[in-house]
Amino acid sequence: MPARIRERDLIIPALRAAAASLGGEITTTKLIEVMEDEFQPEGTDAQILDGRNDTYFSQKVRNLVSHRETSTSMFTRGYATYDAQSETIRITDLGRSFLDSVPQE
């Protein structure tokens, strides 16, 4: 059985996706597409949630935004900002500096 993908495993790839996007910003919808391509979720992560159109995995990506007030979020740490009106994540200069310090895979 494949290992479940954890929300915290999505932070660095999400920041990289924003950094690679025009203007350093990405919508949550586009981020889900990019992350699904990168992670290729399977097993439980690929299953549709009861009563929803989201998979467990896409909900984890959305949770990056909905959990943005937690002390460990990329938003609270200042690595990104979120615009609720446009549903857009934008990487900050601090976020770019953080990515520069993270070893490439």
Image (cartoon, grey):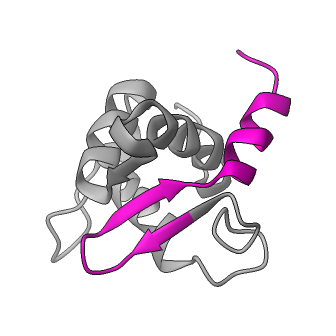
Relative image position of residue 80 (x, y in whole percent): 59, 60
Q: Would residue 52 be counted in the magenta stretch? A: no
Residue at (70% x, 81% y) in the render: 70
Q: Nearer the viewer, residue 42 or 27?
A: 27
Q: In the rendered image, which quarter is residue 69 located in?
A: bottom right
Residue at (24% x, 71% y) in the render: 86
> Which residue reaches farthest top?
105
Q: In the rendered image, which quarter is residue 85 located in?
A: bottom left
Q: Is residue 55 in sight in this rendering?
A: no
Relative image position of residue 10 (x, y in whole percent): 57, 46
> Which residue reaches farthest bottom?
69
Q: In the rendered image, which quarter is residue 5 located in?
A: top right
Q: Would residue 94 be counted in the magenta stretch? A: yes
- Magenta segment boundaries in residue numbering: 81-105
Relative image position of residue 37 (x, y in whole percent): 33, 27
Residue at (47% x, 56% y) in the render: 90
The quadrant of the image that shows the C terminus is: top right
Task: Reply above or below: 40 against 32.
Answer: above
Q: Is residue 61 in sight in this rendering?
A: yes
Q: Nearer the viewer, residue 95 or 66?
A: 95
Q: Nearer the viewer, residue 79 or 66?
A: 79
Q: Nearer the viewer, residue 73 or 21?
A: 21
Relative image position of residue 9 (x, y in whole percent): 64, 45
Q: Exactly how many numbered labels are in the figure?
A: 0
Judge left or right: residue 18 versus residue 33.
right
